[in-house]
Amino acid sequence: MQPGKGRKGKSFKQRLVLKSSLAKETISEFLGTFVMIVLGCGSVAQAILSRGLFGGIVTINVGFAMAVVMAIYVTGGVSGGHINPAVSFAMCLFGRMKWFKFPFYVGAQFLGAFVGAATLFGVYYDGLMAFAGGKLLIVGENATAHIFATYPAPYLSLTNAFADQVVATMFLLMVVFAIFDSRNLGVPRGLEPIAIGLLIIVIASSLGLNSGCAMNPARDLSPRLFTALAGWGFEVFTAGNNFWWIPVVGPMVGAAIGGLIYVLVIEIHHPDPEPDFETEQSEDKLDKYELSVRM
């Protein structure tokens, strides 16, 4: 037999496979956040650029929520589908993810959101140029900056805006913890993203008036930075009395509070399962725990 004849070389697919689990998770978070921004902000773009003809507040709330659902389905099995630095922060804070992964997850989320905003800008470039005679405006009836990032209502103070983001994200993380708690009612495996989508719809429908309910630093800051570079100008950071930092810091605080409330009020009070029952359910419980660790 000729030397090497019995050994098969690696296929093209095998050469592409990543060996590092952290690399896989990082790319997954990038892709998930990219999907969320293109489809979620796309629902806003369709409503704004059609002047309400092809959408409104209902399609925006449902569209963005479903964008999150689809993003989690794409990435949930690899990285947990956090697609939100506030979620990743809470996962680390409460021991559900190791801290060394945090900067990789967050960096991927911010980059994915930026690329997503750039992609959406390209898709709707002609529409944006035709909307206000080629002008890219931040305020007024022909404003388009809010397609990409959130801006406060005229009446909203910074203190109220900060409280708004803290409370909204608090509810988000509190219910996310409940959804993935195997000792609570839980959700059938594979339907967790649907439950999260419904959660986002109800939060956006009840707490979205003040400032659009961002609840996600990457979802807001990266597209805002893109708009600053793409023609809207750096006034996107000074608009609304320098509102830009509120959707960045507020969700991080709210995530910590929401997770803490769930752990202190619900999670630590679960009774320990019977030893026999725990043995019988070990496989299912492990799967659920793995999901809860990541998401």
Image: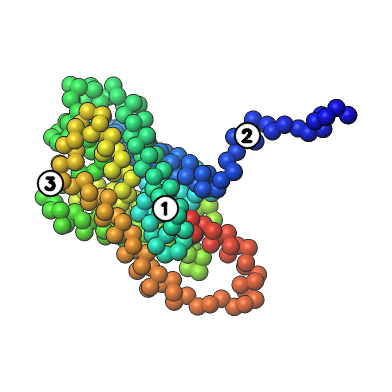
Which residue is the extreme one toward the front?
3
Q: Any mark on residue 102, and which?
A: 1
Q: Is residue 224 left or right of residue 65?
A: left
Q: Are marks 3 and 2 in contact (CB under 8 Å)?
A: no
Q: Residue 39 at what x, y percent from top left?
A: 38, 37
Q: Which residue is mark 2?
A: 15
Q: SS of the residue at dot 2?
A: helix
Say if 161 sits above or below 233 in the image: below
Please tell me whether mark 3 or mark 2 is closer to you in this view.
2
Residue type marked 3? Asn
Q: Quadrant of residue 91?
A: bottom left
The way the protein has been coloured in the rendering is rainbow
Cα–Cα span, label 2 and label 1: 27 Å
Q: SS of the residue at dot 3?
A: helix
- Name the residue nearer the viewer: 190 or 16: 16
Q: Residue 116 at what x, y percent from top left?
A: 37, 35
Say if 58 sits above or below 88 in the image: above
Q: Residues within 10 Å of mark 2 (few under 14, many from 20)?
A: few
Q: Which residue is mark 3?
A: 241
The residue sitting at 43% across, 47% down in the picture is 104
Q: Residues within 10 Å of mark 1 (few under 14, many from 20)?
A: some
The residue sitting at 22% across, 49% down in the picture is 245
Which residue is the extreme one toward the right?
1
Q: Residue 95 at what x, y percent from top left?
A: 45, 64
- Name the residue nearer the viewer: 215 or 10: 10
